[in-house]
DNA sequence: TGAATTTAGTTCGATATCGCACTATATGAT
DNA sequence: ATCATATAGTGCGATATCGAACTAAATTCA
């Protein structure tokens, strides 16, 4: 491996590009969400769908790497909109479990569907195979940062 | 190319991974910045360094894809900290030019240096070549989203 | 040229995010 | 069992972000 002086700028650029893409795509995505909803709402629903619900707020906050106070706020919005419900945590009376509702599941599906045309348009300019090929690396980086967080 | 039903979930996962990596790395990076500074501050300084300064706030806001009101706020923080200065725009009296100061340049360099050890640690777990190989795709995606924004 | 329209930046108000401190419950030590 | 400590979630205050409306200057057009 080359020396850090060579590698660091490249790795830095990697995170820079990731950050810019996130910013641009978030803007685009948020514009597709129903009025009054933010990426933060979608992110929670997406997490519950992908990882399974009946998780505690703290678990979700840790997974998404947001402060628990921020999550409290986001969850209260989702609750008010009927997209999640709470349940007591049988193992711990201090805690509670978050469940995604039918409406929440549909909300997520609709959001993804609303983004569909944008993604198709992207594929007219960027080769699908290249995107697919990049996924393992992205997952590897994410997984490393995820472990880092705990350690 | 496969049908959209096959490609869309993959492209969606791509943006999902990018979003998570951004969230995790931002957290890490922000923790390395001096107290009272946020990613938004760094992002502006980084942009001015990479793209050249003497840009107008609106140009910067468009490039970073943040509302101009948000940028006004971020710039005022940078100004107060002495990391940027303003100059009248000779071409347009409504506008002004943003200049990065010596202190601003150092701030950026220090921030990047402070992150160095984290990046080196990452390279012990993720192959440098793979990161480097992913850059062209990321740049291509960013560039497309960038054009999309205007059109 | 003068009036209508557009544009750069700011102000203002609303909401999101986040750190700190607090309450209630759980866990651990003796 | 009792007490000390740790943990889950929330309330509160501070600041960041953002949309709408505003001001001042530029541009367009008659």
Image (spheres, coloured by chain):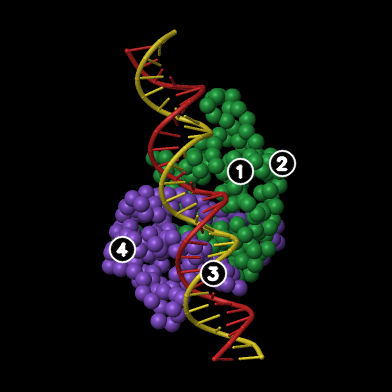
Chain colours: A purple, B green, C yellow, D red
Q: Which picture quadrant has residue A102?
A: bottom left
Q: Which residue is mark 3?
A: A146
How packed is label 2: few (under 14 Cα within 10 Å), some, or many (20 or more)?
A: few
Residue drawn at point x = 42 percent, y = 40 percent: B150
On residue B102, the disc is 2
Circle 1 or circle 2, nearest the eye:
1
Q: Nearer the viewer, residue B150 or B85?
A: B85
Which structural element holds mark 3?
A: helix
Label 1 lies in what chain? Answer: B
Q: Is residue B97 visible?
A: yes
Circle 4 or circle 3, nearest the eye:
4
Tell me the quadrant of the picture where the N terminus of chain B can be found. Answer: bottom left
Q: CA distance from mark 1 to mark 3?
A: 31 Å
Q: Is residue C7 left or right of residue B82?
A: left
How packed is label 3: few (under 14 Cα within 10 Å), some, or many (20 or more)?
A: some
Residue drawn at point x = 57 percent, y = 69 percent: A149
Which structural element holds mark 4?
A: loop
Q: Which residue is mark 1?
A: B77
- Badge 1 and badge 2 in a common chain: yes
Label 3 lies in what chain? Answer: A
Residue drawn at point x = 40 percent, y = 81 percent: A90
Residue drawn at point x = 51 percent, y = 60 percent: B23
How packed is label 4: few (under 14 Cα within 10 Å), some, or many (20 or more)?
A: some
Residue B71: percent from the left, percent from the top?
A: 53, 42
On residue A82, the disc is 4
């Amino acid at each position: 491996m080359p020396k850090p002086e060579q590698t660091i700028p490249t790795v830095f650029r990697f995170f820079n590009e990731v950050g810019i893409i996130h910013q641009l795509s978030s803007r685009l995505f948020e514009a597709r969400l129903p009025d009054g909803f933010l990426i933060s709402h979608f992110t929670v629903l997406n997490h519950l769908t992908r990882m399974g619900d009946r998780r505690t707020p703290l678990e979700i906050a840790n997974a998404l790497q947001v402060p628990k106070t921020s999550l409290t706020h986001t969850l209260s919005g989702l609750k008010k909109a009927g997209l999640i419900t709470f349940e007591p945590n049988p193992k711990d009376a201090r805690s509670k479990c978050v469940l995604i509702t039918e409406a929440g599941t549909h909300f997520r599906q609709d959001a993804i569907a609303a983004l569909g045309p944008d993604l198709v348009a992207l594929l007219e300019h960027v080769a699908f195979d290249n995107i697919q090929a990049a996924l393992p690396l992205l997952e590897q980086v994410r997984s490393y940062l995820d472990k880092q967080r705990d350690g």
